Image (cartoon, coloured by chain):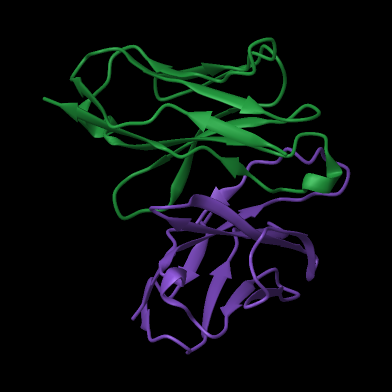
Chain colours: A green, B purple
């Protein structure tokens, strides 16, 4: 079945540092890939997405490229801020598989702490 | 446009009781999915409803059930609560327009935090 592997945290960075969170997946077909962010006490917010190979999703300075050859969707940000402190989740969507419907398969989450 | 709303936000129950959680999707969204989030198991898919029908189901016991109403609002019910049911329950909605690919974006609500004592 589908699965997502994410680097474990916590990741502690200084402000303006470069952030990378690794995400690899196992799936059949052509899934969509997502990054969600969760701030303390809140639900999940969509950060970015990519629906096919070589697509690059980007939002708020974050980027991730759908790499089918390496089954990866690593999240990057060039200069983090204290406000980026949160838990980040990589997720796999059903893609073109009708059997999967709208089910998302999530990685374990990576906690990021940015210090001033 | 208002986001996904969930009620109640916090709930305390005792073992053996049952609980009903409610979710109102974004206006115009027809698909509602439910997820359970715990520190040990992470985020796990419970089920998805579309047009008042369960379209997909995760690996949870039959104590977990749900339904969707004609206005797309959804409820989930957990009967005979166990301590391990303590979790954040998240609802997500998506458009589910017929003919679109299935890789739709899901938008999450703030969740209902359930504590079972």
Residue A84, horizontal then vertical, whole percent: 29, 31
Give the x, y percent position of residue A73: 56, 20
- Residue at the image point whose x is 63% and y is 36% from the top: A3
Q: Residue at x 71, y 48 (%)?
A: A102
Tell which of A77 and B78 is nearer to you: B78
Query: Image quadrant of residue B80?
Result: bottom right
Task: Report whether B57 appears left or right of B98.
Answer: left
Q: How many marks?
A: 0
Q: Quadrant of the N terminus of chain A?
A: top right
- Residue B36, percent from left and from top: 51, 60
Residue extending farthest left: A116
A77 or B13: nearer the viewer: B13
Indicate the quadrant where residue B73 lies. Answer: bottom right
Relative horizontal placement of residue B84, taking residue B65 as reference (left or right): left
**Residue found at the very far right of the displayed protein:** B99
* Residue plotted at (81% across, 37% down): B101
Q: Name the spot of residue B77 as percent of width and height, x first.
A: 59, 79
Above or below, B71 relative to B48: below
Quarter of the picture containing the C terminus of chain A is top left
Q: Identify which residue is drawn at 68% across, 58% down.
A: B58
In the displayed structure, A77 sits above or below B30; it is above
Q: Residue furthest bottom?
A: B17
In this picture, is A18 found above or below B37? above
Query: Observer-nearest residue: A100 or B81?
Result: B81
């Amino acid at each position: 079945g589908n699965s997502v592997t994410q680097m474990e945290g916590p990741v502690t960075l200084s402000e303006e540092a470069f952030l990378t969170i690794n995400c690899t997946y196992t799936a059949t077909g052509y899934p969509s890939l997502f990054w969600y962010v969760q701030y303390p006490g809140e639900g999940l917010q969509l950060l970015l997405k990519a629906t096919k190979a070589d697509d690059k999703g980007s939002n708020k300075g974050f980027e991730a490229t759908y790499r089918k050859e390496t089954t990866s969707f690593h999240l990057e940000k060039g200069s983090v801020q204290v406000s980026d402190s949160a838990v980040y989740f990589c997720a796999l969507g059903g893609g073109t598989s009708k059997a999967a419907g709208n089910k998302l398969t999530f990685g374990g989450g990576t906690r990021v702490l940015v210090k001033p | 446009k208002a986001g996904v709303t969930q009620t109640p936000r916090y709930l305390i129950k005792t073992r053996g009781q049952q609980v009903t959680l409610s979710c109102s999707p974004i206006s115009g969204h027809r698909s509602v999915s439910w997820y359970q989030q715990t520190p040990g198991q992470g985020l796990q898919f419970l089920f998805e409803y579309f047009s008042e029908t369960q379209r997909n189901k995760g690996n949870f016991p039959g104590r977990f059930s749900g339904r969707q109403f004609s206005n797309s609002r959804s409820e989930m019910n957990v009967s005979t609560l166990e301590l391990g049911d303590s979790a954040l329950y998240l609802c997500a909605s998506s458009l589910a327009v017929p003919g679109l690919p299935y890789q739709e974006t899901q938008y999450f609500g703030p969740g209902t935090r359930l504590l079972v004592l």
